[in-house]
Amino acid sequence: MATRARVRAKKDLEQCTEIAALRTRLGETTVSHVLREGNKVADRFAKLGHKAAAQRVWRDEPPNEVLQFLERDAEGK
């Protein structure tokens, strides 16, 4: 995966290497880029993570900031 894209940050490179190792264990997989407009849920989670002062983990319920986007996504909107 990292062979086709330029990865500059050391942490990103480590994650790409880990993902590549996991993909070999899963068998045939496909990875593709989706623009933020095409995945508003992931975009909202990324924004929350960027603004967070500390690591946050959601187990049972998504945060309110993401819930409306999940509902729209489930409705196909």
Image (cartoon, grey):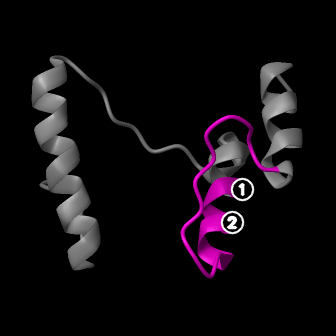
Q: Report the front residue among 63 and 76.
A: 63
Circle 2 SS class: helix
Residue at the image position 14 percent from the left and 54 percent from the top: 17
| Residue to which mark 1 is pinned | 44
Q: Which residues are magenta?
A: 44-63
Q: Report the front residue among 72 and 62.
A: 62
Residue type of the residue flagged with mark 2? Leu
In the rendered structure, the answer to whether residue 56 lies left or right of residue 31 reads right
Q: Quadrant of residue 29?
A: top left
Residue at the image position 39 percent from the left and 38 percent from the top: 32
Q: Position of residue 63 (x, y in %)?
A: 78, 50
Q: Position of residue 69 (x, y in %)?
A: 82, 40
For residue 75, say whether it is visible.
yes
Q: CA distance from mark 1 to mark 2?
A: 6 Å
* Above-or-below relation of 46 to 26: below
Based on the picture, tell me whether residue 15 belongs to the magenta stretch.
no
Q: Position of residue 9 (x, y in %)?
A: 27, 78
Q: Are the two marked residues, 1 and 2, in contact with CB atoms closer than 8 angstroms?
A: yes
| Residue to which mark 2 is pinned | 48
